[in-house]
Image: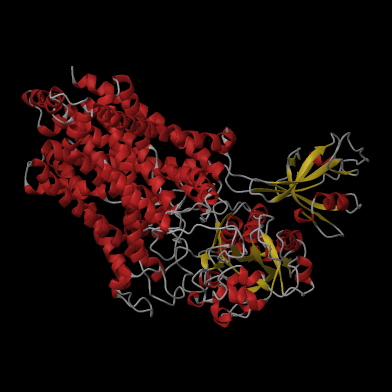
Amino acid sequence: MHNKRKIQDNLLKSLTIGAALMTASALFIVFYFVFTSGFSLLSFDLLVSDYKTEQYNTTLDDTIETTMFEEPEGNEAFFSQIYGISLKDAENKDAEAIIVIDYIAPESPFNTLKSINENETVNASEGGVITRISFENTSTALTREGAESMINKLDGGHTIREIIFVEPGGGIRGSIIATLYLIGLTLVMALPLGIFSAIYLNEFAKDTRLTRTIRSFIDTLTGIPSIVYGLMAVSVFIPLTARFNMASGLSIYAGAMTMTVILLPVLIRTTEESLASVPNDYREASLALGANDVQTTFKVVLPNAIAGLLTATFLSIGRIIGESAALIFVMGTAVRDSVYPSQGATTLAVHIWTLMSTEPANVELASTIALIILTIVLILNTTVKLLAKKFDKLGNR
Amino acid sequence: MNVVVKRLVFLSALLSASFIIIVVVFVILSGIKPFISDNEGLGPVSFIGFITRTIWLDGPTFVSNMYGAGYLIANTLYIAFLTLLVSLPLGVLTALFIAKIAGKRTGALLRSIVELLAAIPSIVYGLVGAGLFLPVIYNTALSFGIQTNGGNSTLAAVIVLTFMSIPTLTTISEVAIRNVDLSLEEASLALGTSKTQTHFNVVLPAAKSGIFSAAILAIGRALGEATAISLVAGNALSGPTFSLFNRTATLTTAMLQGMKETTGLDYDIRFSLGIVLIIVILITNFALNMLKKRVGKMHAQ
Amino acid sequence: MKKIILVLTLVFAFTLYGCSASDDTFETKNINPYTRDTSSGTRDGFMNGIEFEEAATDNSLLGDNVTVSAGNNEILQSVKTDRYGIGYISLYSVTNEVKPVSFNGVEPSIENVVNESYALTRPFNYITRLDDDYASEIEKNMSEAFVAFMLSSEGADIINDNGAVSVTNNGYWDDLVANHPVCEGDNSHETINFGGSNSVEGIAKDLATAFSSRCGNVQTINNHTGSSDGFKRTQGDEKDGSNRVHIGFASRPFKDAEKVNGEEYYGALAQDAIVIIVNNENPLDALDADTTKKIFQGNYATWEDVLN
């Protein structure tokens, strides 16, 4: 009987430890996956470049003398003697066929191509992707026809009209800027509204039915799923911004208004708590010195609740960065390179959604963005914790 | 000047409180349209039909008004409860571990891990689900001879939601467990029961009401989660799906699906889904709260 | 504790019951057909080609086992991962991850589209907004410039490179651009929206990228949701909505109701083939119109009916 108990005990205990291990491993699974899929794409370049594919339309510089080139040693790609480049067939990230420059001779005219529109020089380089080459008196060499065919046409002696390169893009600068805009606009709207509401509820309101109703109405906001906020935003904030001529249709302005409503309950609650933790002695002392209650609130209580306010701000920023469902409805899913608050755009989280909902899904880039988001969340969380510690110390003086 | 400021803060509070009304009113206004208006010649959608039918749209788009969300409601509840079934034990046991078994350092570490899990945005969970779990489910199922649609399945949705629910469950359960009167524990130990026995037969039952609240909160979130599940659920146009390995769809994924595409009835019907979602959440909350009271009464005896 | 285990076991058993275990031969397996939705021009062309016109806009005529997908890529992914799947996509979407089957004895290829021996072909068409229906003069000029670009030799190159067969070539864009002074300025504040057929999306995106680089870096948005939306969002019910579009595309001939505003607003772009695809492990090589129709009607439930 004793043994059966012991076995049962050990079983239960190991289940408990097992559960805790599983929970801990959940965090590692998430970070591990995001890191391994996304780290390779992470670069400064990614953060500042455009999302859309960039096309370069170029021609040869006529002033350059051309000579015949010799095929380099060990060349396995297709080589053009007239132009000194070799091309090969390859596949890009989306498993589409592309033609890639394998080698360029140092004197090749491809080194100094002239851009048609911009009057600048474009350097072709090894690894560059040629999309099409069009000629004067023969059909264009297309990617579909393959590298060999393109080289044959090059060496066929026809005059080149245009050489078209494509740079794949995939940068997230636009989404980063949109996220920053959204955070800024939301904080500008939400902080005053939230702090003033909290001030009213904690400092001035009396315990009447009205106050209790206001409190419960604000609290109910937390139970609503964010996608419903998205629906509400489409029927309220989008027409509102149109009425005031701020925007027509999707916009970051409308997004900021939506996030304000979503953040309100948390903001108000955290602010109330930090106001409540300011000892009453401070208030009484201030009143005793002759200040009225408004002055007391703004000049004495509020400054002492700064730590709490900062916490609330950081929590809000974290929430804004993480929000996706509501913003999909109100800011849209089109990734932009030039971001204007009066137009829609994607935040980092919505950008992940856009990448994952096309077929085939671009898991690598999405993971890179997720990596960035997780890092920011990590930093924000740690900061909040440190602030809480400081806050505690101050409060317990 | 004083009066102005006081009025300003009062108005702020009033405005904050009014948002809930704005949300409810406007969602209802837009969502009710398909049921009472003529929908540009298509005829009103029958409400009873909407909440009972098992096919998303019977007939061609823009011609038929036979929308059905019945199967979506069933799927949503099914997935939410399955999630609770898996995540509640995990969350409560983890909480027990942190509160009673772990040392101070380990406990603090685990608590930070749980906080971090809570802070991760839902879209990242969806990404991990789609990128990691879908292939795993697809391959595992295939080796058992079960066919899945690239891994999109109820199982995938439940796994993703479990990841998202555990932090909430763990945190709140931990608080509940900590709040159990130490004297109860000491009394039990004094009577000769082992620590583990005490935990499972005395502490956990005493923390029941707090754990129940955690469950209610977690279910609320599971019912309302949208983007994460939509990346792993597939897009079932009929249902309901009770098999773990078939594609499914929920109220929220149906709202997200195809929102780029439409105007008219096809667009408005998504607001109606919003109303149904709110109703489902309210009813579930209410039912669970009633259950909690009943369990509380039983326990108090 | 015991109760929990009991419940979990019941749930597990219940859900296992919902799936079928399998044995190993191909023949006994159920066919999983995939189709596009009712707004798709590809579906329209496909159903007409297999002599099942009634099913072009009516899902209830299809078998219960048919799954509706939103685009070429979705069907590609589905058939790629579903051993027992069969679907149809645009020729230029075909990759070596799936297996094309010949139709009525003819292999799907560009040559067979050009020499008109492959029967499942359909046109790619475009449609624009009405002259007085633009938000600004710049928008109008830019749309007209795009149409000119699309029909030039550069446009033809892009269409051909994507695996369709271009049917127009109005000369070099360099010569045409003189008629469109709007392309000389900086247009990065402007946006042109494209929409309509999902099958033309790849071509439309490439055309948009190329056009943007030649016309002041105008921003372009591609939102392709089906051929019927091509007309709807340029001249039809949704032309002023939030999904409005400047140039719409369709992968089927325009219906009379869509041609109502006159010939100057629409035109032909290319010919494209619809290819029936199956999973790479499927032994099937050829189909005819009648068998295909029966598959999508649901009359053939397992691969046995088709492979023999």
Q: Where is residue A11 in the image (x, y as percent from the top left)?
A: 32, 32
Q: Which residue is painted at 53% across and 41% down in the image? A: A173
Q: Position of residue A301 (x, y in %)?
A: 17, 28
Q: Quadrant of the N terminus of chain A?
A: top left
The reply, left or right, for residue A301 in relation to residue C188 is: left
The image quadrant of residue B198 is top left
Q: Can residue A307 be seen in this view?
A: no
List the single residue furthest toward the front. Answer: A1
List the single residue furthest toward the top. Answer: A397
The reply, left or right, for residue C290 in relation to residue C74 is: right
The image quadrant of residue A158 is bottom right
Q: Quadrant of the C terminus of chain A?
A: top left
Image position of A383 with respect to C204: above or below: above
Of C128 and B272, nearer the camera is B272
Image position of A133 with respect to C245: above or below: above
Image position of B86 with respect to C44: above or below: above
Q: Position of residue B159 (x, y in %)?
A: 41, 45
Q: Which colour scheme is used?
A: secondary structure
Of B230 and B132, nearer the camera is B132
Q: Position of residue A165 (x, y in %)?
A: 72, 47
The image quadrant of residue A111 is top right
Q: Is residue A385 visible?
A: yes
The mark tally for this picture is 0
Of C38 and A389, nearer the camera is C38
The reply, left or right, for residue A229 in relation to residue A45 is: left
Q: Which residue is painted at 63% across and 74% down in the image? A: C292
